[in-house]
Amino acid sequence: MSFTAAHLFFEDLEIGKEWLSAGRTITEADIVNFAGLSGDFNPIHVDHQFAAQTPFRRPIAHGMLVFAVASGLGVYCPPVRTLAFLGVREWHFRGPVYPGDTIRIRGRVIEKTIRGRGRRGEIVWQRQILNQDERVVQEGILITLVEARGGSSNSEAPSDENSDDRREPSAT
C-alpha cells in the first residue's frame, strides 16, 4: 500500500482528536484460521463442547486475533503515514468476543513528540475495541512512528532536535 494524499502527516494529528472505524465481523472461520496460524488450539476457542462448560458458554475469539483485526481497522482510522509500530504501553482485555460479533475501534491521540529532526514523530494513541453493543472489549495505549512533512516542528510536545529517534522501529 502506498500513502495517498488522504494519509495524514504527524503535523495533521491533533491531541484529543478522536476517530471511530468501520466495523468488522469476527467469524468462526477467522478463529479457526487464527488457531492454525498461531498454533493456539486452546479448547475455549475451537471446541464447542468444552466451551459450553465455561462461563462464556460458547467458543470465544482469541484475544490476540481481536487485537490483530483491530490493528487492521486502525490503518484507516484515520489514514496516517505510519512508518512503524513502536509499542504497547499497556493493554487490557475487558470482555469476550464471540463469532458473529462486530468490532470497531475508537482511537484518540493523547501525546505527540517530534523525532528525527522533524522528519517523523511519535504518536501515542488511546485505543478501544468496541463490540456491536458499544461495550469495550479491549483497550490500551499504543505508540506509532508517523512521517512528518519534514523540518518544521510545530508539535505540541517539545522538540528533540539534537538526537535522532530514541529507539529503532520494528517492522509493521
Image (tube, rainbow, N blue to C red):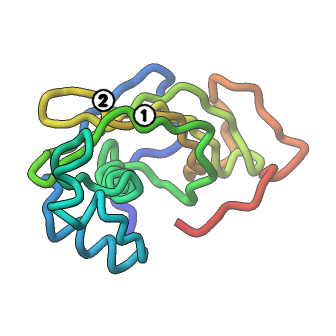
Tell me how many marks there are.
Answer: 2
Q: Is residue 18 above or below residue 131?
A: above
Q: CA distance from mark 1 to mark 2?
A: 7 Å
Q: Residue at the location (31% across, 35% down)?
A: 95
Residue 69 drawn at (x, y percent): 31, 57
Q: Is residue 168 above or below residue 162?
A: below
Residue 30 drawn at (x, y percent): 21, 67
The quarter in which the N terminus is drawn is: bottom left
Quarter assignment of residue 38: bottom left
| Left-right relation of 137 to 17 | left
Q: Which is nearer the eye, 41 or 102?
A: 41
Q: Residue at the location (16% across, 61% down)?
A: 49
Tag of residue 45? none
Q: Is residue 6 visible?
A: no
Q: Pointer 1: what residue?
A: 139
Direction left: furthest residue? 100
Residue 12 drawn at (x, y percent): 46, 35
Q: Which is nearer the eye, 110 or 41?
A: 41
Q: Pointer 2: what residue?
A: 136
Q: Residue at the location (13% across, 29% down)?
A: 133
Q: Which is nearer the eye, 7 or 170?
A: 170
The 10 Å Cα crowd at callout 2, few under 14, some 14 to 19, many 20 or more, is many
The 10 Å Cα crowd at callout 1, few under 14, some 14 to 19, many 20 or more, is many
| Left-right relation of 94 to 29 | right
User: For the residue marked with disc 2, what is the amino acid?
Assistant: Val
